[in-house]
Amino acid sequence: MKPLLPALFLGLGLSTATTTPAAAYPVDCAILLCLAGGWPVSAECGHSHAVFIRRITPWPIEPPLQIWNCPMRVGLRGEQRPTERLYDIVFRADLPPAALSLPVVPASPILVDAQADVDISDPAFDFVRSIRVFHIERATQYWRGGNNDVCHQAQSVQLGSYGVQGDFIWQRSDVGAVPTAFDGLQGWRGSHAYDSASCPRLNQRAVFVEWRDHEGNYGFEQVNY
């Protein structure tokens, strides 16, 4: 797996002149490959990055990578590795139709126990497990009550993350877990006694996604709504 990755990522930058249109392949296979390579410049990676971000743009908020929709096990030829199969799916326009036969993905709700159809527990796939999605809602309320004036900052934070085999799950979190790259953490103090002049006003809703590519380089996107 590891020796093959650099060659595949190099191919990303050379593929735009010889490949099929971006919508002709399972987009999650392209997301998987392009994310690992740090989103190199190509038509395929540009399209897959747009889908990756559109999925976290409300509503609904979806897993940005849906690896269970990438058929890495389907149509394996001989001793072909999963990553070689992935490259074929995204970039090979010269394969016969039978070799590129893909399962029909039903338009049904995403199950949290859906996962990759091959073993991705190897550390080479840690870039999948590095993806974290934060859905953040915050607001300020100021209550006046004699000597007990309170500046109350309410929060609702959900964290979406990936398991060992690429399964996606939401869980409760809090502002303290939100990465420092998130734009808007300033002014958070929780609930304290303040006068109205020193009560910081907050009214924010956002989705934040972060990841690291296969070399550990950090990336993120934030969508405010």
Image: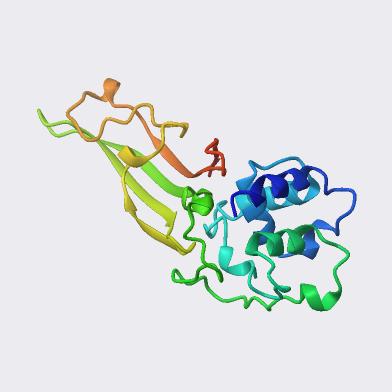
Instruction: Provide residue 125's location: percent of width, then percent of height.
Output: 53, 53
Based on the displayed image, in which of its 4 quarters is residue 25 positioned?
A: bottom right
Point out residue 138 in the picture as x, y percentages from the top left corner.
37, 41
Colour convention:
rainbow
Q: Is residue 179 left or right of residue 95?
A: left
34 displayed left or right of 185: right
Q: Is residue 162 among the parts visible in the rendering?
A: yes
Residue for point 80% across, 48% down: 43
The residue shown at (33%, 27%) is 200
Task: Look at the image and tell me whether residue 27 can be seen.
Answer: no
Residue 47, given in percent of the width and then of the height, sits at 74, 51
Along the viewing direction, whichever of 25 and 15 lies nearer the viewer: 15
Of residues 58 and 140, the one nearer the viewer is 58
Residue sticking out furthest to the top: 197
- Whole-percent x, y for residue 52 in the image: 62, 52
Of 40 and 73, the residue lying toward us: 73
Relative vertical location of residue 54 with respect to residue 110 in this rendering, above or below:
above
Q: Is residue 84 above or below residue 101?
A: above
Q: Is residue 216 above or below residue 58?
A: above
Outermost left residue: 147
Quadrant of the image for the N terminus? bottom right
Seen in the picture, residue 65 relative to 114 is either above or below; the reply is above
9 with respect to 214 (left or right): right
Residue at (41%, 36%) from the top-left corner?
179
Q: Residue at x 44, y 71 (%)?
A: 113
